[in-house]
Image (spheres, helix red, strand yellow):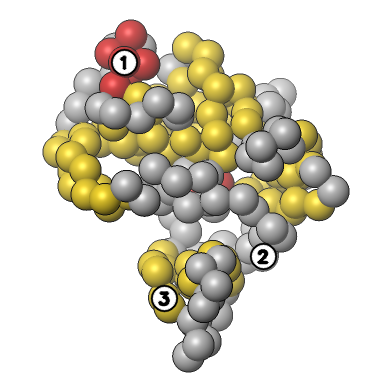
Amino acid sequence: LSVTALSSLSFSGYGDTIFKCKNQQGGLLYQQTACKPDTETVTSWEPRLPKNPPPTPEAPKKAAEWVIKQQNNGSYHLDAKVNGKTLNFIVDTGASMVSLPQTFARDAHISCQDKVDMMTANGASKACSATVKKITFGPFFVDNVTVVIAPNLSHPLMGMNVLQLFKIAQEKGEMRLSWREK
């Protein structure tokens, strides 16, 4: 699975279609308008947001912001708890789903629910999906998250099914996450 660096990304509204476009140089763009004729549409999706994220000390109703520092290799990592077990994720806007290594899923007692075929940067792959009760990171938590359990994944990926819930901005070696306002 590939890691894609995030240049500057901010999606403003709930329910807007998000288009993932590839330009002629191979760069990926995330936008709320259809891809231009000189770019390739990689995928598009409608964000699926939780009905009402509960306001708690972990996820305050006001726009809490969390800053993640860029790693030396250009990627962003965050520590998160999945069903109470801590794991270090790569923030990957090129990943459609949160992806967990099979070994972690087994240790965390997360069982496969459905078999899935995946297309990754390394080609086609077989995996399975499951639902985790809660993913917590920084001041945020998201309930009932669909994840992919991948047998050959070396590092967990925080994918767009969770990241789409947030306003994301990246500048000067920092990524800022905050809940999208309704």
Q: Quadrant of residue 175?
A: top right
Using the rendered image of the protein, determine whether residue 50 is visible from the camera's viewpoint: no
Amino acid marked by disc 1: Thr
**CA separation in Å, label 3 and label 2:** 21 Å
> Which of the two discs, 3 and 2, sits closer to the camera?
3
Residue 12: which disc?
2
Residue plotted at (28% across, 13% down): 106
Sequence-wise, which precedes: disc 3 or disc 1? 3
What kind of element bears circle 1? helix
Amino acid marked by disc 2: Ser
Q: Quadrant of residue 99?
A: top left
**CA separation in Å, label 1 and label 2:** 36 Å
Q: Position of residue 53 (x, y in %)?
A: 57, 39
- Looking at this view, name the residue that lies furthest to the left: 115
Q: Position of residue 48 (x, y in %)?
A: 44, 54
Residue plotted at (67% across, 65% down): 12
Residue 146: which disc?
none
Location of mark 1 (residue): 103
What kind of element bears circle 3? strand
Please identify the quadrant where the C terminus is shown: bottom right
Q: Position of residue 47 (x, y in %)?
A: 47, 59
Q: Badge 3 local density, few (<14 within 10 Å), some, or many (20+)?
A: some
Location of mark 3 (residue): 41
